[in-house]
Amino acid sequence: MRHNEPQSFLQKLYKYRTYLLGLVILVVGIASIVGVQAHQKNVTEADSTSAVRAKGPTAHAIQAQQKQLKHKLTHYLKSVTADGTASVSFYNLGPTAGSSAAKSRTTRRLYKQGQLAASANAHTPAVSASTYKLFIAAYLFHQNHLGYYDWTLTEKDGFQRMIVNSENDFAEGVLDAYGLTTLDDFIASEGWYSPTFVANQASVTTAYSLTLLLKKLALQQAPFNHAHDRQWLLSLMNKQIYRTGIPAGAATAKKGTVVADKVGFLGDINNDAAIVTLPNGQRYVLVIMTHGHGQTGFSGFPRMAEITTHIQKMMYDPSIVKGLNK
């Protein structure tokens, strides 16, 4: 009787090679399909993530951040005006066109003009001191556009001294020539607080009215809608010599910040009204009106500088936009 010799392992592999090859092909095929699907899923997820990042934060996220910033700012402004000796008004203008800030979609959305505006005591009438000279400038530009006023060399010199050095003779001459009522009527027609000028009384305005005026100046709106006039006034405000208030505070918050402002000081009154431009192109209007606290001369200017520094750091911290873009 013959016995079959047991087949070796290699012989068995050879015998069933066709089946084994098919099995290998099947396994490789399944693995390939699974791998392709996983890759496609990863690509889809990556594309979705990239799309979300390119699109930026949601409208809800932007609105939530705006609400939070306004809440913090309003709380701070209430704290620095609580004793009734200060008025503060803040208005964000948005980034300048073409600036680095304007190139960021998130920044443009978050800092959209006016969305972060806040104030405290801003509608309370207060002694304007020399900030009233901004109303004089607005009136003269208006008259010039109508053809009722000519800029002679003498007028230009007086106007420059009025803004840069805060000298009084030119402004007082305008009030005498046109009359207090005429100026008040013009101011009222612009939607600003009136009467500002009352005989034998210090001129009065509000932080809100000065904010409205500076907003028009910044946005080249009438009566500042002539580019040459606007640039002339802004250049003079950039050079005004009393710079220990808002200009100092803004520079402390961010080196290289540019401030075009008009100050006022009279007795214990220290005021500053400014258009502020950060190095990245962000812009805002800030008006601070103060009195009391034993202020004399310019002793209240550091107080205004401190308020400015706090506001600018709070509202324009770079980490805010970075956090939204995560």
Image: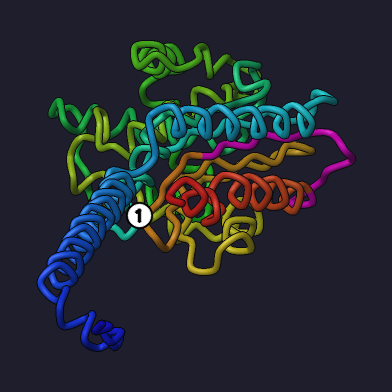
Q: Position of residue 243 (x, y in %)?
A: 59, 59
- In the image, the segment drawn in magenta is 286-299
Q: Main secondary structure of the magenta part?
A: loop
Q: Is residue 297 magenta?
A: yes
Residue at 83%, 43% in the rendered image:
295
Q: Which residue is mark 1?
A: 101
Taking depth in this image into account, of 297 and 117 the one nearest to the observer is: 117
Q: Position of residue 197 (x, y in %)?
A: 53, 18
Residue at 56%, 53% in the rendered image:
317
Q: Position of residue 89 (x, y in %)?
A: 58, 30
Q: Answer whether residue 4 is visible to the viewer in this image.
A: yes
Q: Answer whether residue 172 is visible to the viewer in this image.
A: no
Side of 15 relative to 122 (left or right): left
Residue at 35%, 17% in the rendered image:
190
Quadrant of res 52: top left
Element carrying mark 1: loop
Residue at 25%, 88% in the rendered image:
10
Of the 4 image quadrants, the one containing the N terminus is: bottom left
Task: Please determine whether, in this image, residue 235 is positioned above or below residue 151.
Answer: below
Q: Position of residue 131 (x, y in %)?
A: 54, 36
- The mark total stands at 1
Side of 102 relative to 313 (left or right): left
Q: Residues within 10 Å of mark 1 (few under 14, many from 20)?
A: many
Most distant residue in the left direction: 18
Q: Is residue 277 magenta?
A: no
Q: Amino acid at mark 1?
A: Ala
